[in-house]
Image (cartoon, rainbow, N blue to C red):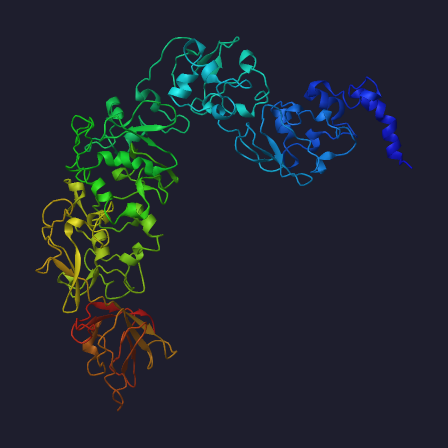
Amino acid sequence: MKTKIQWLVLLLMPILIFDCGLDEGPDSISSHKPNSGLVSDCTTKCHSPESSMSPDPLTTNGRGTAGRHIAHVNDMGFDCAECHLNYTDNDTHMNGQLNTGNPAINIVNFDSTNPTGQWINDTGLQTGSCSSLDCHGTNIINWYGGGGTFTNCTTTCHLSGSLLSPDPLTTNGQAAAGKHITHVSDKGFDCQRCHFDYTDNNTHANGQLDTEDPDINIVNFDLANPNGQWINDTGPQTGNCSSLNCHGTDTLDWYGTGGWTLPACTYCHTLAIGTIRQVFGSGGDFDKESHHVIDYNNRNNEIVTQNDCLICHDMDNHMSGTVRLKNKDAAGQIIVYQTNNPASLEPFCLSCHDSDGATTEAVALKPFSSGNTLGTAPNIAGIKIKESWEKQYGHRREGLTCVGDGTAGTGCHGNYNSGTGDGSINAHGSDNKGLLTNKLTLPITSSTWDESRYKLCLDCHNNDPSVLTISELAGVAAGGNYAQSRPNYNQWPYTVDFMVSGFHDYYSYNMDRQFNLHLYHLIESMEGWYYRGGSTNGIPGCVTCHNVHGVDGQYYYLWDEWNFSIEYDSGTEYGKVADGDFTGKGYPEFCSGNCHWDGNYRYPRSPFNEAKATAGNTSGGVGLESGDTVTIYFSDSTNGPVIDETNIDTVLQLSGGHSWIDSDKGGQTGQLTAVWSDTDGKTDNVLIITIFIANSPSGDPDIAAGDSISFDVLTITDLNGAAIRGKMTIQGGF
C-alpha cells in the first residue's frame, strides 16, 4: 500500500518530466536529459532553490564545510558536466534518492579537463576529496574541508600545445604577438604580477578566451604597480600597460615592436614599491648610519653611484623578484639570493671579504667609488672575515649566517629597528654601526653604564642557556668585597648571589680590593681602545677581546692573535697571552696599556673568593642585642682560622672605629663566638659571628648595619694560601 507521499510523487511525475525537457514520451525517460548539461539547465529547471524534489547544490552543498559548489559554479562559472560528466545518463539520476549520502554510488566523474581526476575518500555524508586534478596539481583537496589553491599557471594548465587553455608563451609571446616571453621567460615574472587574483575571477577556467573580449579585463597589477592600468583594449592583439612603476611614465604598446631599456637604479628604487624597500634618497638604505658605500667623515651622506650598484648586482632577469649577485672571485658566476634562506648570501659576502678582496674589479681592495680600502682602517677586518668565519669555533658553527633581520637564528648584519620591531635582510645600509641588525655602540666614550649599547650581543646571549648572561658576567654580590666603591667605578648594575665570571683579578690597581674585570672593561674610563683601528679611542667593548666571526682557540672566542691559554703556578690560575705588545694600535688589540702584565704577560684569575656579610636579628629585640648575628658567606672554601674576641677587631676590622666586642663584660669572658660551617660542597665557607653584650657603658659593641668589614689580608685565606682581600658592607639589619 502506497503512502500519501509516494502517491504525490506519482501525480507530480509528468510535470517534473515536462519541466526537465523530457517531452518525448514515457519510453524515453532514461535517454533524454537536459541539453548538454549546461549550468542553466540543471540549476534552473530541477536543481533550483525552490525545488522540494531535487537538492540545490548551491544552497545545500556550497561553501565551507558544506562543500565548494558556489566557489566552482557561481564564482568560477564551471559547468556541472566538468565534475559530473554524463551523470544525467546514469540510471541513478532522478531516482528519487539522495545519492550523495551513499558512498557506493559515485556521482562524480571528471571531463577531459581533468582526465586523471578521481573522487576519493567518500565514506558517507559530507566526506570525499578530489585527487589528481590538473587544476590543483598534486594537491588532494578535501571538498568539505580547507580551501585549495591553483598550482603554477604555466606548468599545470597553460601548457605548450594545450587544446583547453592557451599557452601565453607561444600564443601571446614577444614582438607583435605580445611580451610574455620578455616578462615571464626572460625576466622571470610571476603570472600574479599582471594577472593578480585572476584565478579567483568567475571568468577564469570557464572555457572562454577572455582575451578576445575587451569588456572582460584579465589584467590587474599587484602591489609592485599599485597604479598600473591596462588600457586601449579594443579587441584581439590590442592594449597597453600604463602608469607602471616598472616603466615610469612610458605607455608601452604590449603588441608593438618598440623596445625598452632599464633606467638608472635611482629611477625605480628611490621610493618603496610594494614589498621592495627604499634604497636611495632621504630615509633610504644609503642614507643610514652605516652603509657599504660610505664617507666616514659624513656618514649620512649618500654617495653611491650607478656603477657601485652594478659591482654587486647582476641585472639579468632584473625585476623578476629574484636578487642575483656577482661572485667577486669568479667573473661570470652568479649567486642567487633565496629569500627563505639567508645563508644563500654567504658565498657572495665571503667572495669579497676574503684575503684578496673583489678580484673581479680593477682594484680588488678598493671596489667602490668611495675609495675605502679593505684591510686598512677603518675596514681593517674587511679581508679577514672569510678566514675567521671558517674557523673551528664561532657563530657559524652555532647555525648563524652573515645576514639577518634581527630575529634569532639568522645573522648579525642587516637592519633592525628595536622600537618598531621591523627588520630587514639588508646589505645596503643599517641604522646601526657595522651594518648590524641591532645596536652595538662603537666606540664608547662614556663611562656611564648603558646595557642598550650591547643589544646585538645581549638580546641573544641573555636568552641562551648555554652561555653566561650579562648579569652573571658583570654581576657581584650586594655589599660584597667586589662591590665596593672607588673613584670612577661605583656603578653596580647587576646583583648576583656570588660573582660567576672567571674573569677577575685581586691585584686591585693600587687598592687592596677585588674587581669584576668584565664590568670594569665595559664601564671604567679605559680610553685607549681604537675602534676598527681608527683615530677615535674609547672604552673596550665585546668585540675588543672576542672575535665573533670565529677562532681556532677554544677559549671564549678570544682572538687567535693573542694565543690565549690558562696556566697554573703554585695553585694560582692565570690567563696568559703570548704577545704583550698591547701598547700600540696593531690589529686586533688596539689597547694602550700593559694591563695584562705581571712579568709574564698574564693576569691572575684566582683566588675566586667573593664574600658578603648579612646582619641577623636573632635575639628578636629592637636594635643590637646579645645573641644577634653577622653571617659572612664566602663563594669558595677557606682555611677556617680561629677567630675570637682576641683577634676579631683586627681580622675583620669595622669602619668608623666600631668594635665587635663588649669592653666591659661584667666579669664574663669569651662570650662572642665565631663558628665556621660547610655548605655547597665547600669547606669553612660560612662564618657565623654571635654578638655578646653584658654591660656596655662605653657604648660598645657598636657594630651596625651599613658598616664595612675589611679583611686583614693575612688570616683568612683560600686553600692555596692566597689571602681574601677587600671589604664588605653589612646588609640587612638588627
Residue 296: image quadrant is top left
Whether 99 is drawn above or below 564: the answer is above
Left or right relative to 433: residue 110: right
Any part of residue 192 in sight: yes
Vertical order, 485 against 322 (above or below): below
Name the residue located 12 percent from the left edge and 49 percent from the top edge: 592
Q: Position of residue 463 (x, y in %)?
A: 36, 52
Point 23% across, 82% down: residue: 644
Location of residue 490 (image quadrant): bottom left
- Total marks drawn? 0
Does the rendering let one see residue 255? no
Q: Is residue 430 above or below residue 243?
A: below
Q: Name the foreground residue: 11 vs 445.
A: 11
- Name, please, the residue furthest toward the right: 1
Name the foreground residue: 326 vs 684: 326
Q: Residue furthest left?
A: 599
Asked whether 494 or 579 is in front, the reply is 579
560 left or right, relative to 1: left
Residue at (72% x, 23% y) in the render = 42
